[in-house]
Amino acid sequence: MKFYITTPIYYVNDIPHVGHSYTTIAADILARWKRLNNYDVFFLTGTDEHGAKIAAAAKEKDKNALELCDEMSAKFREAWDLLNISNTDFVRTTEQRHVLAVNKVVQTLFDKGFIFSKKYEGFYCIGCERFYAQKDLDENGCCHFHKTKPVLQSEENYFFKLSSFQKSLLERITDKNHKEHIDIQPEERRNEIVGKLKLGLEDVSFSRSAIEWGIPLPFDKKQTVYVWIDALINYITGIGYPVDETKFQKFWPADVHLMAKDILWFHSVIWPAILIGANLPLPKKVYSHGFFTLNSNKMSKSLGNVISPKELVDKYGVDAARYLTVTLIPFGPDGDISWQGLTLKYNTDLANNLGNLISRTIKMAEKYFDLLVPQTIPNLWLAKNAAALLQENFASNMDNIQLHKAAESLQDAITLVNKQIETDAPWKLARTDMVKLATCIYSYLQAADIIAMHLLPFMPTLSEEIWRITGATGSIIETAKKYFTDRVIPETGFSVAGSQLRVSGILFPRVTE
Ligand code: ME8
């Protein structure tokens, strides 16, 4: 089975911040989860490098456009390396392979009569890289997203006959049984898209005559492909279209396009229309999450209130930064983050709940059992309870992209074990019942192993560390792949009696504001 997941390709006029990280970490968590479930995963991200916005940014910095793109695209790659993102490929729209893909799609649409030229006048928002009609702007004539006044522009452009796709799109979006059904999530946003679609569609700009920084149209070299059309095609460039037919056939259609709500329209209406026009299958799911605000303000470079991935990693460590970014707000609606909120969640979920479970267990094993998994009758009761709780709540939430809920069920499983430790009070048993103490410690280790396997997509490095600390045998990834297939805990547990445990340093040092 294959699983193809994408993030948006990010504009290179901005540095990567926690907003971009949010989508990318979420996609990475889903990619890792599917790999653990034995899917052949392709995970694509990249950078969007053409168009007016990038040309303007280069001019402002007195740089050649490609030079700026090289520099900024590298910053995104560095950020994703820092956050341990496991993307399969990274596409840049200035690459030759992408130019080939764009040419092929654009020429096909032209040959099929979906492209025509007309004179157009509209308000162009450079931040959104799109035209707006007066009615789409706010009462001050500003764009709703950027709060800036778009400039009235008039051009002889090529247009894409989006209007002729209204019926086909509505059918594919609303009819779950359609063989080309495209599932737009969350539901409220799908309803908004359907509502807008029902009102009718206007044809959209397909080329720009005034913008040189772009891919020339194959049938009219004086114009460049409109940056959004150019950008959306990256999703097929990245899997080999049109040169590597085998790879393309294997991975297309995408299983999930992930993004925030700002660009849902492009992904759920314009992109599918292009694909229908080019006779290509549609993505299966388009999922948009909400916007992060920071202390109630929109994060933006100009407001100077962006959080960079590096700041998060410096403060909490890579794995905790990943976990906190995707779990602090529900995955779907907008939400506010703050340093206080991040630190509180770090201390509650990680330093206290998970950190305590591991450190208490290992300290007792060190003190009373020479840092070995105690020799005892295998007691898997607690591990099985934790596993049952996770089986019920974790997998379905991961598959439904409810990452905060999946993380909540992990915390519930950790709490279950910690409560059991409180009930057993093993520190008292050391004086009265060493046999029972051995059984208890053994059971905490097995439950910790179950938790570590589920934690892998969120915290790939620390889960492996926990696996080693608890003396579990073999590779955690291979063991988890098997476990998620058959859901069987071996009779001896994962941490076999007599195995050597490792002293854990402090996994999650407490963080103060
Ligand atoms: O739109 N909260 O690129 P972009 C949540 N190049 N997510 C955020 C965010 C925030 N505050 N800020 C950014 C573009 N994002 C186009 C995409 S795809 C064919 C072309 C994330 O650099 C979120 O995923 O403006 C959002 O949709 C995306 O970055 C926008 O990135």
Image (cartoon, helix red, strand yellow):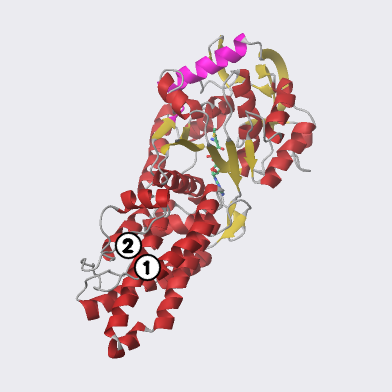
Q: Residue at x 55, y 18 (%)?
A: 224
Toward the viewer: 131 or 291? 291
Three-letter code for the amino acid on which mark 2 is drawn: Glu
Q: Dot 1: few (<14), some (14–19), or many (≥20) neighbours within 10 Å?
A: many
Q: Are marks 1 and 2 in contact (CB under 8 Å)?
A: yes
Magenta segment, prevailing SS (helix, strand or loop): helix
Residue placed furthest toward the bottom: 431
Q: Which numbered disc flags the more N-terminal residue, 1 or 2?
A: 1
Q: Position of residue 406 (x, y in %)?
A: 51, 57
Count residues near mark 2 (Cα–Cα under 10 Å), then give few for <14, some for 14-19, many for 20+: few
Question: In the figure, residue 493 lies in which quadrant?
Answer: bottom left
In the figure, residue 194 lies in which quadrant? Answer: top right
Evaluate whether residue 317 shows in this view.
yes
Q: Is mark 1 within 8 Å of ligand 1?
A: no
User: Given the image, on which type of amino acid does mark 1 rest?
Assistant: Leu
User: Residue at point 44% right, 48% down?
Assistant: 33
Q: CA distance from mark 1 to mark 2?
A: 8 Å
Which region shows up in magenta? 92-111
Residue 109 percent coordinates (x, y): 60, 15
Q: Position of residue 281 (x, y in %)?
A: 57, 25
Give the quarter of the figure containing the N terminus: top left
The residue pinned by badge 1 equals: 380
| Label 2 residue SS | loop
Residue lying at 59% horizontally and 38% vertically, measured from the top left: 286
Residue at which label 2 appears: 491
Against 260, residue 394 (above or below) is below
Element marked by disc 1? loop
The answer to if 485 sits in the magenta stretch is: no
Is 109 magenta? The answer is yes
Q: Does 329 appear above or below 115?
A: below
